Image (spheres, rainbow, N blue to C red):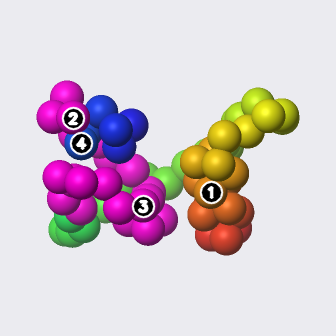
Amino acid sequence: MLSLVSAGLGAALLPQSIRRLAFKGVRYADIVGTPFPTWPLAMIARRQPQPPVVRHVWRIFAEDG
């Protein structure tokens, strides 16, 4: 998703934990003043082999619980 935003192909609503990923040309902004609903999310990935970027993103989300 961030690659698409970085390439100028749109914008995205993502969890704040994504801020840890640095992408050239991507600006992060907090959404304030609007009560957004929350819902549980799950991340899926191939078991093996996993590219380094997948392992990195997996660790970021695992840290947030």
Main SS of the magenta segment? loop
Q: CA distance from mark 3 to mark 4?
A: 12 Å
Are circles 4 and 2 on residues that touch, CB within 8 Å? yes
For image coordinates 63% across by 69% down, the residue present is 64
**Of the residues under marks 2 and 3, which one precedes in the sequence?**
2
Q: CA distance from mark 2 to mark 1?
A: 21 Å
**Of the residues under marks 1 and 3, which one precedes in the sequence?**
3
Local SS, label 4: helix
Residue 56, numbered circle: 1
Magenta span of residues: 7-28
Local SS, label 2: loop
Q: Is residue 20 visible?
A: yes
Residue 7, numbered circle: 2
Instruction: Report if residue 26 lies within the magenta region.
Output: yes
Where does residue 13 sit, x and y in percent of width and height?
Answer: 32, 46
Q: CA distance from mark 1 to mark 3?
A: 9 Å
Q: Residue under circle 3? A: 21
Say few, some or many: other residues with alpha carbon within 10 Å of mark 4 (under 14 / 14 to 19 / 20 or more): some
For image coordinates 15% across by 34% down, the residue present is 8
Q: Amino acid at mark 3?
A: Leu
Q: Amino acid at mark 4?
A: Ser
Are circles 1 and 4 on residues that touch, CB within 8 Å? no
**Of the residues under marks 1 and 4, which one precedes in the sequence?**
4
Q: Amino acid at mark 1?
A: His
For image coordinates 68% across by 61% down, the residue present is 59
Where does residue 61 sit, x and y in percent of width and height?
Answer: 62, 60
Q: Amino acid at mark 2?
A: Ala
**How many numbered callouts?**
4
Where does residue 11 sit, x and y in percent of width and height?
Answer: 22, 39
Q: Is residue 10 visible?
A: no
- The quarter in which the C terminus is drawn is bottom right
Q: Residue under circle 4? A: 6
